Amino acid sequence: MDASMNWTAANPAARALDGRAERRSVRMDGHVMLAGGITHEITVTDLSYEGCGIETNAPLEPGQAIKLSVLRRGALDAEVRWVKDGKAGLGFPIKTETPAQPRKSERVSVAAEVWLRRMGKNAYQCRVFDLSPDGCKAEMIERPLVGERAVIRFAGIEPLEVQVRWVEGPQAGLSFERSFHPAVFELLIARLR
């Protein structure tokens, strides 16, 4: 994995003095797609879970909705926040949560590394913070969409398909397609602790 993309190393809740999420300096080439499918080359210069800074000659306007595509990283929706002297600030819209539903079972507090693969993307390690037989809360490197499907793998257990139920900053709630059998869940918790 590219070291510039290892955002979990920093505290994602950390805020700069101006109230923005901490930004990491990066240098990634890509494109922005404007209305009508017109694309322009860009370079991402800094990045956080909430947005990024870019260098571009594209005719951007504050408030404009665009699609940001970074080479080998995928594409996502963004909104132009500001533009000045060949640079622009983009914000990533926060997806709303699905309506709260009561949990089927209590969650157990853990802190574990797992492998996660979003459909059509490469697998990467992420952290799981709590776990139940029906789902978990994970810190994601790339912000997923609510309803998106992925595959998660705990060491020593076959991969499980999950669905994203909610997203808040770098964290997401994942529900397992198949619940863990109580005995398997007990063994997994014992291993993770």
Image: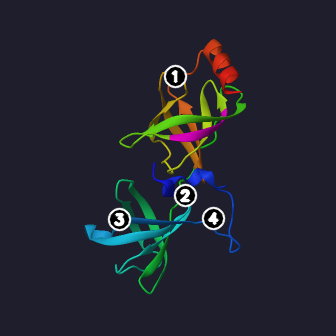
Element type at marker 2?
loop
Q: Which mark is residue 30?
A: 3
* Dot placed on the residue nearer the N-terminal end, 3 or 2: 3
Residue nearest the observer in this picture, 60 or 72 = 72
Task: Identify the residue under disc 1.
Answer: 178
* Dot placed on the residue nearer the N-terminal end, 4 or 2: 4
Q: Is residue 34 left or right of residue 160?
A: left
* Dot placed on the residue nearer the N-terminal end, 4 or 1: 4
For marks 3 and 2, give the one nearer the viewer.
3
**CA gap, disc 3 to disc 2?**
22 Å
Q: Is residue 10 left or right of residue 140?
A: right
Q: Which mark is residue 94?
A: 2
* Dot placed on the residue nearer the N-terminal end, 3 or 4: 4
Q: Which mark is residue 21?
A: 4
**CA gap, disc 2 to disc 1?**
28 Å
- Identify the amino acid type marked 3: Gly
Estimate the x, y position of residue 164 in percent, counting from the top left: 52, 40
Magenta span of residues = 125-130
Q: Residue at x 56, y 37 (%)?
A: 174
Q: Quick one: label 1, few (<14), some, or many (20+) residues within 10 Å?
A: few
Confirm whether residue 168 shows in the render. Answer: no
Q: Residue at x 55, y 32 (%)?
A: 175
For marks 4 and 2, give the one nearer the viewer.
4
Is 60 situated above or below 191? Answer: below
Confirm whether residue 184 shows in the render. Answer: yes
Q: Quadrant of the C terminus?
A: top right
- Identify the amino acid type marked 2: Ile
Q: Quick one: label 4, few (<14), some, or many (20+) residues within 10 Å?
A: some
Element type at marker 3?
strand
**CA gap, disc 3 to disc 4?**
22 Å
Estimate the x, y position of residue 116 in percent, counting from the top left: 49, 37
- Identify the amino acid type marked 1: Arg
